[in-house]
Image (tube, grey):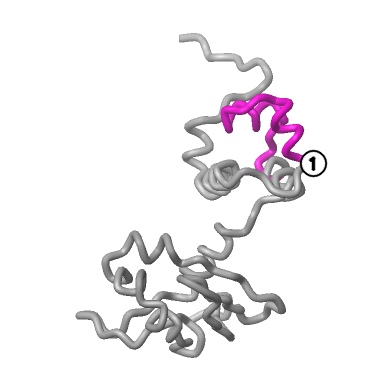
Amino acid sequence: MTNDMPRLTKVVPAGDRILRVRFAGERRSHGLDLTGLIARSRHFALLMHDAKLFSQASIVEGGLGLAWPVKTQWGRLDVSASTLRRIAEEQQPMTGADFAAWRSSLGLSLTEAAHLLGLGRRTVMGYLKRAELPPVVAIACRALARDKHLLAAHFVPAGKTTRPAA
């Protein structure tokens, strides 16, 4: 086991299907809305309308996950800290500065970023100044950064490209 695995140090119920969690090495906590996870998994479905049961989440395995006092055919009902870390990252709003960093990290011009996202160049320029981008743009940017094949499938260079003679 490596030390770079996410570990939870704190969990507090914060409303219907929302938990405030803190990961080891961080000062701030994250508000995680687990509605999507619960709604999309038959294993977690019983937490959808039982706030009391949902609020009984506890840290297990030295912080490697959370569990609820529910028995399943595989053991207790639990979710890994890695999954929760990913949810926290995906639910974090993307700012104009984050968008600029995304564009820079992929080496995209304004025109290339606009084409890749199906937006106008002026819209992309405007996003650089926004406090928060639309969630669909953040989702697309994160997916493109994570998956080089997805990026390659949709990328069109802004400059002239030459094709080898057939």
Part of the protein shown in magenta: 105-128
**How far across and down, in percent of the image, does residue 96 sit?**
74, 45
Residue in view at x 67 percent, y 80 percent: 25
Work out whether 105 lies above or below 152.
Answer: below
Residue in view at x 60 percent, y 78 percent: 23
Which secondary structure lies at badge 1? loop
Residue in view at x 55 percent, y 57 percent: 90
Q: Which residue is mark 1?
A: 129
**How far across and down, in percent of the image, does residue 46 sit?**
30, 73
Residue 82 seen by the camera:
no
Q: Residues within 10 Å of mark 1 (few under 14, many from 20)?
A: some
Work out whether 117 lies above or below 33.
Answer: above
Residue 70's quadrant in the figure?
bottom left
Work out whether 47 lies above or below 55.
Answer: above
Work out whether 65 lies above or below 130.
Answer: below
Residue 125's quadrant in the figure?
top right
- Residue 120 colored in magenta in the image: yes
- Residue 139 colored in magenta in the image: no
Predominant secondary structure in magenta? Answer: helix
Residue 108 seen by the camera:
yes
Residue 75 placement, left or right of 81:
left
Residue 1 placement, left or right of 77:
right
Point out the residue furthest to the top here: 165
**How far across and down, in percent of the image, does residue 95 sit?**
71, 50
Q: Nearer the viewer, residue 26 or 69?
A: 69
Q: Where is the C terminus found, in terms of image quarters?
A: top left
